Image: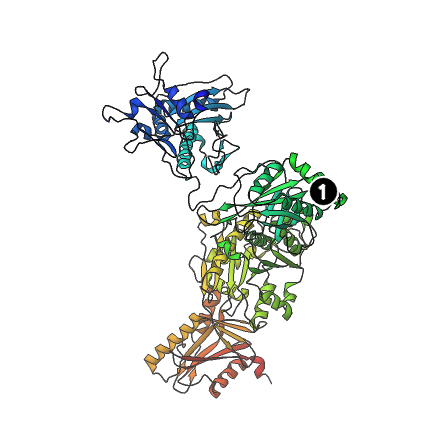
């Protein structure tokens, strides 16, 4: 066979003058023998032709060879491949799967149970293949637990061929290694030669890369059926040049790492113009496990301080398998226009920019990354020159002179015999890495500026989620320190005990993502908000997250932002229930007047008005005396807190962050929002989750006592409805009015108007005055107090001045004086709203009258 193969030209044929080959032979059969045909097919460069198969009684035709200036070729214009030849391994695998009479075929002495099963399956496939697959040899494991190697011959004549594909011969010899732990360990496949070593999916000269992700693609229950099917898929794609189909990632070249150091590039590479780019890359971080690369610096630019790695980037490709010797690498670079002198100078300067005892890092880039059919990006490989050799290069440079350039001689002598120590490169360049959270809600946070109040249970989890979402800047505020007890559910380590929480959180953010600008402050947030300069700092953020669960912070936010003249970013507040099985989140937007306190109050009222809202209402606004007692983990010396595990906290916080991301990304900036959350077991128990949103209030300024009056849209709509009714019943010029229900906060100087009534039945209405009656007012007030758990109560009265301006008359002032000086009402202040114009175009004013205004 060797003598027959040796004189073969690039185009070569073997012609067998015989009758048709059988599918298989039995011992003692006369020729032709199928084994001989298979060997011929494995060795021939172009094709094997059998006269008894090429020409048949049904289709007589001669075998014609044509000779021209390019060589000899078979003139097969009218040649049709038979159906048998068109068959592939896939058909054999399918037939073997259907075989019901599987027999125990072969089990060598050192074969494991899994290997025996694999060999049985192979026998079934061979039997069903009609000669397409031939089992040549089985090499038994040398010892218990060793690998069984199977030699196979595969008919490849039926695979469609395309230019650029792997030039498979008519038959190919394959070697399959079956591990002892099969099928939990996956077999490997090699060609029995190295003819295809230049192709991207063939490594180490002959190893075939069959799987992209073994853990998800390999199905143990399929065994060798699945493995041979994968071989068939690979050979078919290889012949058709579809191993890297358009639109799919290119298979990158390989270096076989021998160093334990992982190199992490973090910045996109510069644009590479022919013949090459030469320069350096800054080493930003380094430990015994990894080395991170930052800024790329052209060799002509001014070099910064700090340690540098030398770098050469090529606009072309390299062999798919990189050389493992320095001399081999230099030869490949010379072919691509990079001189040895350039490499020598880059290495020597890199050596001089490192401390003694440190290795030298050399980065080699080639245009072999990207998507098939698209732009080629740089594939980076890293060569590590150990500390001892780097020190030797340094000493040679120092000892060198113009008359005695021993550094050059030293370099060439070393390059002639040295091996290359390749490192593992773990990509983190934005141009290469597709973020795993792309197209998820968390993607909204990338590059954003976030202020986080509170770094406790919720805050420490929020900060880590933001870090992993690649937030740009994070300002952290918390005055507390890490204590042992909180490690149960807050994201700190024992070595951080005693450290300020904001600082510890900033450190943790840095560990997770060094690109985040994490600032921290132990400032008291309530006092911090009173300083205009500090308020301006936080208002520069894209979003503020309040994770303190503090009513003091909520009140401070409401007070300081109520009159702040500049726009504020969205303010998101998060709080957990007392068992960490429920959570409440709110978002206040610039278009809304209120912040956390305001939206919490609206949430309470909305839940109170919902038929199924009581469980959530009882959780966050309890009236049961047993629920109002607080849990103290260290009685007498700790702040009250909630029961709950780290799993509970993280589960609810993650839900809140995903929903918050959706809110912030949605084009509805005029709506403030609220959402309740429950753990899965609570939802299964019938607990509902609720989401509410509110349009902006009508905000009035009280010119008497400085109150801000916030009228909800439903309350305004209610007043306009009563105006329309009065116009229909009494005429358009008759005044009407009614009662106002809401809440007054004397400290914040805010009056909320949430609900209204029409005129009580004993009211007096005319074109010149409206005197509000009192019949039923007490009962109406009691109902609202009970339903809303004291959030809504009587706050004043409203009336109209049809067709006129909403200016109080002497009658109006007299009515207020009577209310505030008599004993019928015990409130200290009352709100009066006057609506001028008409129901279609109302003009509204509001005034808060205080009892002290009428005291002598």
What is the secondary structure assignment of the residue under circle 1? Answer: helix
Q: Quadrant where the N terminus lies?
A: top left
Image x and y of residue 522, in percent: 67, 60
Image x and y of residue 8, in percent: 43, 26
User: Foreground residue, 484 or 516?
Assistant: 516
Where on the picture, by quarter, is residue 806? bottom left
Q: Residue at x 45, y 59 (%)?
A: 691
Where on the picture, by quarter, is residue 419? top right
Image x and y of residue 374, in percent: 45, 49
Name above or below for residue 10 compared with residue 355: above
On the question of residue 269 being in view, the answer is yes
Name above or below for residue 601 compared with residue 25: below
Residue on which the image places disc 1: 407
Name above or below for residue 275 compared with residue 86: below
Q: Quadrant where the C terminus lies?
A: bottom right
Left or right of 304 in this view: 699: left
């Amino acid at each position: 066979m060797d003598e027959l193969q040796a004189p073969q030209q690039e185009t070569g044929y073997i012609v067998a003058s015989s009758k048709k080959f059988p599918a298989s032979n039995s011992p003692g059969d006369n020729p032709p023998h199928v084994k001989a045909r298979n060997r011929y097919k494995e060795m021939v460069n172009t094709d094997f032709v059998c006269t008894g198969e090429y020409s048949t009684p049904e289709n007589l035709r001669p075998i014609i060879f044509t000779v021209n200036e390019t060589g000899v070729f078979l003139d097969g214009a009218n040649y049709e491949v038979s159906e048998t030849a068109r068959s592939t391994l896939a058909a054999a695998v399918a037939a073997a799967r259907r075989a019901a009479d599987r027999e125990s075929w072969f089990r060598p002495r050192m074969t494991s149970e899994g290997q025996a099963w694999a060999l049985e399956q192979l026998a079934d496939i061979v039997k069903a293949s009609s000669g397409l697959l031939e089992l040549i040899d089985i090499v038994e494991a040398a010892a218990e637990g060793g690998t069984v190697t199977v030699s196979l011959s595969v008919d490849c004549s039926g695979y469609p061929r395309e230019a650029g594909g792997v030039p498979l011969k008519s038959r190919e010899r394959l070697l399959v290694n079956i591990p002892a732990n099969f099928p939990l360990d996956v077999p490997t496949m090699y060609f029995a030669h190295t003819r295809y070593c230049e192709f991207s999916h063939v490594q180490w000269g002959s190893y075939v890369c069959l799987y992209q992700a073994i853990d998800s693609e390999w199905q143990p229950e399929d065994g060798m059926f699945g493995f041979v099917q994968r071989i068939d898929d690979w050979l078919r794609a290889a012949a058709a040049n579809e191993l890297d189909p358009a639109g799919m990632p290119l298979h990158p070249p390989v270096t076989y790492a021998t160093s334990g150091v992982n190199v992490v590039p973090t910045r996109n590479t510069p644009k590479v113009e022919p013949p090459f780019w030469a320069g350096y890359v800054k080493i930003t971080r380094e430990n015994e496990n990894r080395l991170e690369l930052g800024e790329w610096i052209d060799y002509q630019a001014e070099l910064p301080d700090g340690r540098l790695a030398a770098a050469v980037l090529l606009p072309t490709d390299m062999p798919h398998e990189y050389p493992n010797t320095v001399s081999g690498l230099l030869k490949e670079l010379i072919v691509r226009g990079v001189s040895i002198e350039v490499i020598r100078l880059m290495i020597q300067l890199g050596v001089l920019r490192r401390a003694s005892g440190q290795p030298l890092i050399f980065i080699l880039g080639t245009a072999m990354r990207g998507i098939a059919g698209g732009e080629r990006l740089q594939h980076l490989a890293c060569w590590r020159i150990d500390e001892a050799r780097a020190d030797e290069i340094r000493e040679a440079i120092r000892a060198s002179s113009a008359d005695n350039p021993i550094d050059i001689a030293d370099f060439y002598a070393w390059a002639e015999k040295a091996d290359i120590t390749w490192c593992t490169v773990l990509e983190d360049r934005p141009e290469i890495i597709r973020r795993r959270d792309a197209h998820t809600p968390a993607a909204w946070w990338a590059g954003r500026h976030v202020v986080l109040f509170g770094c406790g249970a919720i805050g420490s989890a929020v900060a880590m989620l933001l870090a992993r979402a690649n937030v740009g800047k994070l300002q952290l505020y918390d005055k507390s320190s890490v204590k042992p007890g909180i490690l149960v559910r807050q994201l700190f380590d024992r070595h951080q005990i005693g450290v300020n929480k904001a600082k510890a959180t900033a450190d943790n953010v840095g560990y997770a993502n060094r690109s985040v600008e994490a600032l921290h402050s132990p400032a008291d947030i309530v006092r911090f908000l009173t300083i205009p300069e500090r308020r301006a700092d936080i208002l520069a953020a894209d979003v503020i997250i309040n994770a303190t669960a503090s009513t003091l912070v909520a009140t401070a936010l409401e007070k300081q932002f109520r009159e702040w003249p500049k726009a504020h970013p969205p303010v998101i507040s998060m709080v957990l229930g007392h068992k960490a099985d429920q959570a409440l989140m709110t978002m206040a937007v610039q278009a809304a007047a209120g912040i956390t306190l305001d939206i919490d109050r609206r949430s309470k009222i909305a839940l109170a008005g919902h038929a199924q809202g009581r469980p959530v209402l009882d959780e966050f606004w309890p009236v049961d005396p047993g629920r109002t007692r607080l849990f103290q983990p260290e009685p007498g010396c700790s702040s009250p807190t909630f029961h709950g595990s780290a799993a509970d906290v993280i589960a609810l916080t993650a839900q809140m962050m995903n929903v918050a991301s959706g809110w912030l990304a949605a084009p509805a900036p005029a709506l403030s929002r609220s959402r309740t959350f429950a753990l899965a077991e609570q939802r299964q128990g019938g607990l509902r989750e609720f989401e509410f949103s509110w349009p902006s209030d009508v905000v009035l300024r009280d010119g008497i006592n400085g109150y801000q009056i916030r009228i909800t849209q439903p309350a305004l709509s209610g007043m306009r409805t009563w105006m329309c009714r009065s116009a229909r019943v009494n005429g358009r010029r008759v005044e009407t009015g009614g009662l106002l229900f809401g809440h007054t906060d004397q400290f914040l100087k805010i009056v909320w108007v949430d609900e209204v009534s029409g005129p009580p039945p004993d009211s007096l209405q005319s074109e010149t005055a409206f005197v509000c009656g009192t019949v039923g007012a007490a009962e109406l007030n009691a109902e609202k107090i009970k339903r809303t758990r004291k959030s809504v109560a009587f706050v004043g009265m409203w009336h109209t001045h049809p067709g006129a301006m909403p200016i109080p008359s002497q009658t109006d002032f007299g009515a207020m004086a009577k209310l505030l000086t008599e004993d019928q009402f015990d409130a200290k202040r009352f709100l009066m709203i006057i609506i001028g114009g008409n129901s279609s175009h109302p003009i509204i004013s509001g005034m808060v009258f205080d009892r002290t205004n009428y005291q002598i």
